[in-house]
Structure formats: C-alpha cells, structure tokens
Image (spheres, grey):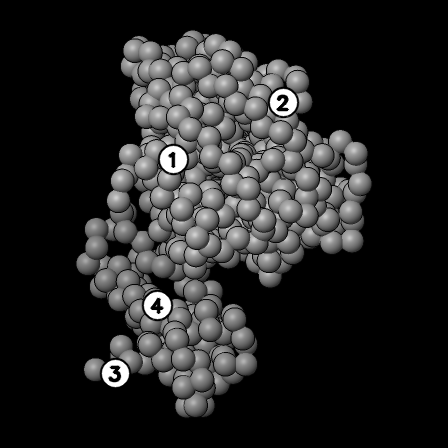
Amino acid sequence: MVAFGTTRVAVDNSAGLSVDFHGVSHQYDLDGQPLPVLRQIDLAVAPGEFVALLGPSGCGKSTLLRLAAGLERPSSGEVLANGTIVARPDPSRVLVFQDPTLFPWRTVRDNVAIGPEARGVLPGSQKRIDGALRLVKLEAFASAFPHQLSGGMAQRAALARALINDPRLLLLDEPLGRLDSLTRLTMQEELLALWRQAEYTVILVTHDVEEALLLSGRVIVLTERPARIKAEVAVDLPYPRRRDDPRIVAQRQHILEILGFSA
Amino acid sequence: MSAAIDEDAGEKSVSSASAGPVWKHGLYAASAWLLAAIVTIAFPDVVPWGSRDVFVALLVAGAMILAGLAFSVEKLGRFGRGLMHYGPWLIVLGLWFAVWELITAKLGWMPKPFFTPPHGLLHVYIVDWQRILICIAYTARLWTIGFFSGIIVGFIGGVALGWSKNFAYWGMPVLKLIGPVPASAWIPATFFLFPTTFQASLFLVALASGIPVAILTASGVNSVNRSFYDVARTLGASSRYLVLRVAIPAALPHVFVGLFMGLYYSFAVLVVAEMLGAKYGLGWYLQFQTAYSAYANVYAMLIVMALLCSGLVKLLFVARDRLLGWQKGVVQW
Ligand SMILES: Nc1ncnc2c1ncn2[C@@H]1O[C@H](COP(=O)(O)OP(=O)(O)O)[C@@H](O)[C@H]1O
Ligand SMILES: [Mg+2]
C-alpha cells in the first residue's frame, strides 16, 4: 500500500487482489446489431502482479478493464476478484481512464477528494489528500482548476484521485497515451515506483510495446476484435529496466512480430 | 481629437491620469450639469410641471460633487476608477438633461401630454412615491413567490427528467408540447381556473420561469459526459452522489441559461398579468396611469422597472460568476 505522507494506514486487506477471467465473452449492442468485442478470455492475474495488455486499437482492451472494474457485466463467463464475482464497481478496484476525466468544476484537490467524499469519509481524509497530492507532485496546484493543468499534470491528478482510495487493483487504460514523450518517461518511472512501494495488482493497457516491457512482469497480446488472447510473454527482468537492454530489445522484436510487424 | 486618449487614460492607466492632478472628465461633467441647471432655471416652462427647483438643486449639487471629485477621485480606489470609467457618460448625461429640458419644457417642441421634461419625472417621484413603493412591494411579492417556486419546481423536474428514464418517458412529451406555448397565452384560461387573480398571476410567472429552467436542466443532465459517472462509480459513489455531485454541477451551465431565459420571461408575463386585473403592482400602475394620460407617471415607472429588472439580471450574473467561475478559460464568456 502507499504511504500518504505521515499517515500510513496499515490495513491488512490492502494487499493486491487476484483477478480471474473465466471464459469471458462480451458484446455490445450497436444500432440493434450485436458487436462481439471479447471472445473466451481466460486470464489469471496473481495478487501484486503487474500485467500489460497490448492489442490493436478497438480490439476490446478498454472493455476488458471495464469488466474488471465492474462498470459492465460480461455477456458470458465470469470475472472474479479474489474469488468473488465482480458485480459492481468498488473503490478497491479503481480504473484510471485514458482521458484524465477530471471534473472541470472541481479544483485538483476536490477532484482527488471524490473517492473519500463519495464514501463519506472526507472529514478524516484531509491529510491523505495532501499526501496523495504530494505523491504526484501537485501540491502547488491543489487549488487549480483542471483547465489550468498540462496534460501530464491532469493525468497525475487522475492518478492521485485513484491512489487515494488505497486500491487493491489498479486498472490503467492507456494512462500515458496522450502525453509527450518526456513526460511519458517520467510518468512511467513514477508509476513503477508507486507500484513497487505498494502491493496492489496492476493491469495496464498500453499501445506502446516498450512501455509494456519496461513496466510489467507479463505482457498479454490480444487479437483483433473480437479479442482473444494471442500470446503471453513473461518479462523476467529486474527493475529498473533500461530500454536499451538487449533482452528488452529482443522481446520487443518478438512482440512486434506477434502483432504482425516483422520489421 | 484627444477624447479617445483621455478616455483611455481614465480607464486603464490610473497612474497617468493621476499624473495630471485633475480628473478632466469630472470637470466637464460638472460644467454640463451646471449648464442643465441654468437652462432649467433661466427659461420659463411652457406649462408648469412642478418640482423644477428641486431638480435644479439636485443638478447643482451633482455638479458640485463632480467638481469636488475631479480633484479627489484618484484617492478613492476602486470606486474612483469606476467613476472615472463612466466620466464620458456623466458628461453626456448633463448635456442630455439640458437638451431634454430645452425641447420639452422650454421650447415645447415635443407633443405635450406625451413628453415630460426631467423635472416632470422627478415630480412624479416626489408626489407619488408612496404609491410607487406599494406597487413595487406588490410586484416584488408576486415575482419573488412566482419566480422562485417556478425555478425550484422547474429545476427539480428538470433533474428528474434528465436523470430518470421513466420520468423522461412521461414528462418529456408533455414538456415539449406545452413548453413552446407563450405563458401569456395561458392568461385567459388561468384567470377563471384560479380563484383569485393573484393566484392566477403567480401561476403564470411560475410557469414562465419554470419551463425554460426545466427544459435546460433536463438537457444539461442528459448531456453530462458518461465518463464522469463511470469515474465516480469506480470511486464508490452512490446514485445520490451521482445526481447531487456529478449530474447537477455538470449541468449547471445549462441550468443558468434556463434561469436567464426564465428571468426574462417572468418579467414579460408579470407585467401583462398585472395589467389584467391586479390591484397595485408595476403593470397595474402603467395601465392605470396611461388611462389617465399621466404619461409622466408612466415614464417614471418605466425607469423604476428598468432599474429593478436590470438589477435582478445583474444579480443573476453575479450568482453565475460565483458558481461557474470554473468555466472561465473553458468557454468564452
Ligand atoms: N458502449 C459501447 N457501445 C457499443 N460499442 C462499444 C461500446 N464501447 C466500445 N464499443 C466498441 O467495442 C469495441 C472495443 O472497444 P474498446 O474496448 O474501447 O477497444 P480498445 O480499448 O481496445 O481500443 C470498439 O469497436 C468499440 O467501438
Ligand atoms: Mg481503449
């Protein structure tokens, strides 16, 4: 779990959740036509694991995360978190969206406070909010409104808003996709550092093979929509990893080939 | 030639304006007001309107204050800067009083019962202020109860319509059907549906202000970015939280558009309703005085109404700036 400044709340249930997809298929309704998005996904994520999902755009990666978050129920199969069926959203499983989706009418601080406020524990959470803001280096912008932030700052605020809830499963949907490459590098390091000092499970959707290899312990490659699991690549390398590490370079090549790029 | 430059100095660079020790526009304005006073006192009225001397006294007092301010305005901080901004207006106001006196009271060029010199208007306030105050109180009661009950019902209804599919299924067609009907079209019906004209008028004002608020609140709640709900739900929000802390604040910009529309409609229907059977009230006063050809009273009341209505609009702007300050930099104001 993450230490928010002085208040490190040691709760034993703060360890990472395990996530299991059992024969999960999902389809959306598109103008009355069923649109199959996921087909027979079987995936087990261990507590505390960092898994990356790669796949062509529109293949169903976000849908997979929405199912894990409980924002959606699968059309068939089941999604389990620590052995219990995921039926509805819960603050222990937090999804960080591709867009920061900060509430524009709230200051950065009040955005971060949404979780505690929604759960009715706002009065006791002030120090934790300060701590979360410090963690993402936004304490100077606590009273700024979202439109006054850069893309990277907004994404960090969204991260703080998720982390304040002590998630046991952090679902990251291309959280760095919109950032410039330098901010991206910093944020990757920060994400990794946060995960390493905490004990939560992470499922990261990304379209950047290198990012997946630098951060995760296992890369899941999905097919075109409807997505199935095409390959799993274990990344057994110690942190911190270097992008010019020959093993990373070789695995990158391997994954690109799986994805159909043979350059 | 230098008018534009002077104006600029008065408005923007206070330092350069205070480099010259006097506020020139203040002196010009004082002269203009004095001129108006002289015109008013020096020539006889074609017919007496009353309160001429009071008006002259007020003009002279105003001129003296302006002259005094011309030398002290830059010590007055914000108020002083505001005053300096309106310097050209004060000058034109003085000149306009002089011309107005000339063409109405002094030369009699304007057709007589219909046009009144400024001191004729002043005379109305001096003679009839009690009745005017009573009328304002009556109208204020009607408007306050009507407008606020209208926007409260409209807002709650709008949130329900925007939030609940069931409400929308039954409510939206009705709202869409009756929404576009001008509230004044209900007047004949309401006046026999309700036992008293006051209740009928209340209903009309509430209807006129409530419907745009309901429609815009509903569309505002409807157009809230779905991801906001997803974010809040993953963070543990209940439905109550989703409505009160997500849907409503997100819809507030729309709600304010509805409030502004409702405010204008409420003024329109208010006056018409009062003209039709009220005893006392601004609309009634206008109607009553027109019947007696007391046009000075009509104008005097129109000025009162202009001040009251624009004051309320201003208040709503202030409320909006308070509540929607976050929109600055997001949308063009
Ligand atoms: N609510 C929805 N209704 C209908 N179709 C949807 C919905 N959400 C996503 N889709 C469709 O499902 C497919 C997969 O979407 P998504 O999971 O967002 O893909 P990815 O995140 O991999 O790019 C896309 O073709 C998308 O258009
Ligand atoms: Mg996506």
Subunit ID for the residue under disc 3: B
* Residue type, label 1: Met
Q: Are marks 3 and 1 on the same chain?
A: yes
Residue A51 vs residue B177, the one in the foreground: A51
Q: Is residue B120 left or right of residue A18?
A: left
Q: Quadrant of residue A68?
A: top right
Identify the disc placed on residue B89. 4
User: Disc 1 on helix, strand or loop?
Assistant: helix
- Tell which circle, 4 or 3, labels the residue nearer the N-terminal end: 3
Q: CA distance from mark 3 to mark 1?
A: 41 Å
Q: CA distance from mark 4 to mark 3?
A: 16 Å
* Quadrant that contains the N terminus of chain B: bottom left
Mark yes or no: residue B42 visible.
no
Badge 4 and badge 2 both on one subunit: no
| Residue assigned mark 1 | B261
| Occupied quadrant, residue B260 | top left
- The kind of secondary structure element at disc 4 is helix
Q: Which residue is mark 2?
A: A81
Q: Chain of mark 4?
A: B
Residue at point 29%, 14% (across, down): A31
Is label 3 in contact with label 2 (beta carbons under 8 Å)?
no
Q: Amino acid at mark 4?
A: Trp
Left or right side of B78 for A115 = right
Identity of the amino acid at label 2? Ala
Q: Chain of mark 2?
A: A
- Counting from the top left corner in percent of width and height, residue B245 is at 58, 34
